[in-house]
Structures are given as structure tokens and as C-alpha cells.
Image (cartoon, helix red, strand yellow):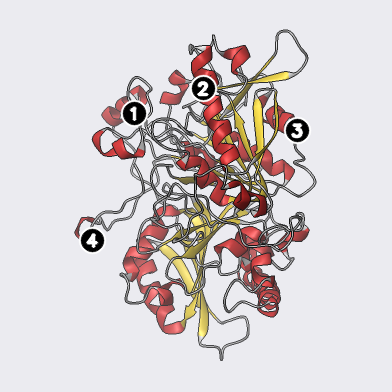
Amino acid sequence: MERHCPKKGEVIKCCVPAPYGYKSPFGWPASRDWAWYANVPHKKLMVEKAVQNWIQFEGDRFRFPGGGTMFRYGADAYIDTIGRLINLRDGSIRTAIDTGCGVSMDTNGRNHSPESLHSIPLIPILLVFELKLIKAEEKDEVDLIVEFGSMVVASLGAFLLSRNILTMSFAPKDTHEAQVQFALERGVPALIGVLASNRLPYPSRAFDMAHCSRCLIPWGQYGTDGLYVMEVDRILRPGGYWLLSGRPIHWKQHWKGWERTRGDLKAQQSVIETIARSLCWKKLIEKVDIAIWQKPTNHIHCKINRKVFKNPKFCKAQDPDMAWYTKMETCLTPLPDVSDIKEIAGGKLVKWPERLNAVPPRISSGSVEGITVEIFREDTELWKRRLAYYKVVNNQLEQRGRYRNLLDMNSYLGGFAAALIDDPVWVMNVVPIQVKINTLGVIFERGLIGTFQIWCEAMSTYPRTYDFLHVDSVFSLYSGRCEMEDILLEMDRILRPEGIVIFRDHIDVLVKIKSITDRLKWDSRIVDHEDGPLNREKLLFAAKLYWTAPAPSPNQEDSKTAS
């Protein structure tokens, strides 16, 4: 279930049609609570989740009430509970990841180590969670009861957005519940993925907060040696938080309901505590079924502690920011060196929203070769000007709510996403592996999110994921690496009907692109560069026309209803 691609001869070259009856998704914020059934036809959920009441079918649409017999207060109330333990509103926490993809489980729910994955069917545990709360019977506090492995549709990420916290949600691909597909249909950032043997596709020091809600990851058991906690540590910023809720946290109260012995649960939590200490994390609090650890701001004390904790040792060989088909290792990713115990390794980040346009520490420290403070500031202003020009050429870009999910296929410093910050959109910033300078860490330091990608391969997402694709010099970058048609077919797959694409490239490249997009049922036109007609770089504005699969036959409809 880890990311893998077919061999060249196995690639199918075709357009993926939208399902019959497809409609443009609801605009944000209505999409947080509603989705058209025809767009994500998974009615089986209505049977499986009827008791929980997490999702309802009303006429021709799904509704996400955020309720149920055990979900009385909703994800919003759960987030408020967290907010009473750490500050979620002062701008210090901007980027978050819902960690928690288990390695694998057999039919009896037993976990397996990475070494055993080749001999068993891999059934990844979800990395996105629907949260459910019940009120404690004997006190006024709200206790957390978490349901694992279910139709979750990224409610945590959806409601954290109201606190200006941008959450990357993860879940494996599946054919029944399609967690990532529902999340994106609701206008919430998400990617398909699992936590197994490869690093997550993010640079080191990327996230302010990592969250795991009864994710059932074997953090220290079954021969994993704390491997997955070490990966969380790699992607957490200095001073970042790890939140763990559900089993085994608060086991003294819930052990009977979990059908586990006291000794078993105590040992499980003890292993987690030991691993956290070995990584030099500080446990801040354990309350209301939530435990919170904080990563140190530097490794001065941690290097001294290696005399006590012989393992894990500090990683030596691998680039901590390299995370594309890169194997995880049981070692501690070292933080950048500091000279004072009070200094923050890698540099201090300012709070959001000032963080967006402040010079990222990776640039101000000179650790990103070839990128200066002046280049960063010029790029920020350049994209403000370019976006204004885009809106002149296509006035639909001025319509608030017309587009929600955006993808920048070659993000560089994240200037395009930064220029859109006042619009009700979010941008998945992609840094292709082939670029000379890895800038994804800079993008995260601006309070934006993104991932690595090779555009000769498919993206880890479902069809009809994005409303708007921004394609700056991608085809020049991949010239001679793979066929232009293959990249365009993948773009067509992930673009919604009536979605738009803006290409920036040399005129000869755009002419070739247009000859293919015309065959893809895209309406397109080439326009001059914002600096005028003498610039050889031009723009191609394209729109994917609305078309769907034909209406199903009566027999197909009966089969679909039964599923």
C-alpha cells in the first residue's frame, strides 16, 4: 500500500470521466458540511456508519453533521479542549499534520513490524480521524472517546482552519470509504499515503503540531524500536507539539472498555514515554484523555543525554530534508547547531500571519544555496503582480468561492500561494524532485503546506481533486524526462470539470501543450506575458469542459444502489 508506480509499458493512457450527474462542489464554507452524492457515490457508508451518525444522505447530497451518539459536541469542541491545554489562537501554531497511519493489522487486529510487511496483506490504519466526544459521567470536563478506522473525512483539519491552522490530513487509498476523496470534496487539504517504511513526503522541521487520535500505530511495540515516533520528530519544528489521544492515554479510566489488561496498557504507555524521553521530548500535560509532548528547541542537552540514552543515535548519512522514496531509519534527526541553550535551532519563526511574508530562517541563515533575502522579497512582490494580471485575463478568479482547492505544480518559494492568502482558497505547493534547489522547507516556514512530487508519475490523490492548477515552467523542467502527454493526462485526471489551468512557459512549449489540451476537451488560449508581447515566455489559460460518463444502465444502477 506504499506509493508505487506501474512500469512504463503498463501505463494506461486515457481520460478519467467524472461520474454521471457530477456537479460542481459546494463553495467554501458550505462544502465543509455538504457534498453531492453523485460526486462521491459511496452510499455504503450510510449502512456502516448509521449508528454513529457521522454522515447523512439527504436527497441528492451528503451532510456531515459532526454528530452521533458518541459525537455530541463535535470536532470543534475537541479542538477547544486542546486549546485549553496549548495556545491554538496566538499564531504560534500554523501548520499541523494528522499523523497516525498504522503499519498494518491482520484480521485479529494484531500489529506487525516493518520487517513482516512482505509476508502479509497490508491494511494501513487511517491517518485522518473523525473525533467523538462524550461528557464524563462524574465530572464537568469533556472526556475524549475516539473511534478508529472509520469514515473520517478530515473533520479535525476542517475545523482547525477557523483557527488559522492549516492541517495536512493523510489516509490510505480505499475503495469503500475514500477518506481523502471526501476530505478534498469538502475543501480540506489531504493526500493519499501511509506510514510504513518510507519517510513522509515532507522536509524536516515542517510542522508546528502533530496529532494522533487513537491511530493504533505501534509506536514502540512489535520491533519498530520507536521508528515512527522518530519520523514524527523529524518533521516537527523545534519546540513543536505532539498530541496523542485515545488508547493507551488515560488507561486507568478506560481499560475495561478497551478490553485490555491494566498491565498491558500500562506497559504500552510506558514504552511511549520512554521513546519520548529518548528523543529529549518534554511531557507537558496528560489531561482529558490527551497527552502532549514538546520537542526541544535545540539539541544541546540532548547530545549530553546520549550518555544516558545510548539509542537512538543521531542520524549521520541522510539529508534530513530528503523525503521521496527515502527509507526511514531508527535514528534521531539532528537539529541545526546553536551556540546558546536559549537559541532555537534553525532560527525562530514569527507568528502567523506575519510569518507569511517574513524572511524564512532557512533563507536568512544562508542554508538554501542561491536564495538570498533580496531574491525572496523580489519573488514575493513578483507574484502579487502576476496574480493581479491573472485576474485581469480571467475575471472568474475575482469571484470569491469560485475555486477552493489549488495546486501549484512548481512552487519555488511559495509566492503564488502567498499572493492568494486573502482569498478563501488553500494551495498544495509542490516542489518537484528534479529542481536544483529544494525549497519545500522554505514554503513550510512561511506557514504554507506542500509535498514533493515527480510529475512523470501520478500524484497521490483521487480524480477531480483540484479546481485550479498552476503550472510554471513544469514542461521545460521535464523536457526529455517523460512524454508531455503523460503529464497532461495526469493533470486532466486530478482537475475537476470546469476547473482551470494556467501554464507559464516558452511559447514553443505552450504551442505543443495546446495541441494536446485541445484533444482533451479543454478550451484554451495563449496570451502575452504580463510584461508585454516581447517576452518569449507566454501564458496559456485553459479550462476543462464539463463532461461525464454516460448514464448507467438499469442493471448498473441496481448494482450501484446495492453497494
Q: Quadrant of residue 176?
A: top left
Report the mark closest to the observer, 1 or 2: 2
Task: Name the residue type under label 1.
Answer: Lys
Specify the farthest residue to the left.
Answer: 9
Badge 4 crowding class, 10 Å Cα cut-off, few under 14, some 14 to 19, many 20 or more, is: few
Residue highlighted by disc 2 = 267
Residue highlighted by disc 4 = 8
Q: Quadrant of residue 282?
A: top right
Q: CA distance from mark 3 to mark 2?
A: 25 Å
- Quarter of the image with the C terminus is top left
Q: Is residue 168 above or below residue 38?
A: below
Residue highlighted by disc 1 = 560
Precedes in sequence: disc 1 or disc 4: 4
Residue visible at 49% across and 50% down in the picture = 313
Task: Name the residue type under label 2.
Answer: Ala
Q: Secondary structure at mark 2?
A: helix
Q: CA distance from mark 1 to mark 4?
A: 33 Å
Give x and y (percent) for residue 216: 48, 28
Task: Name the residue type under label 3.
Answer: Leu
Left or right of 476, for residue 557? left
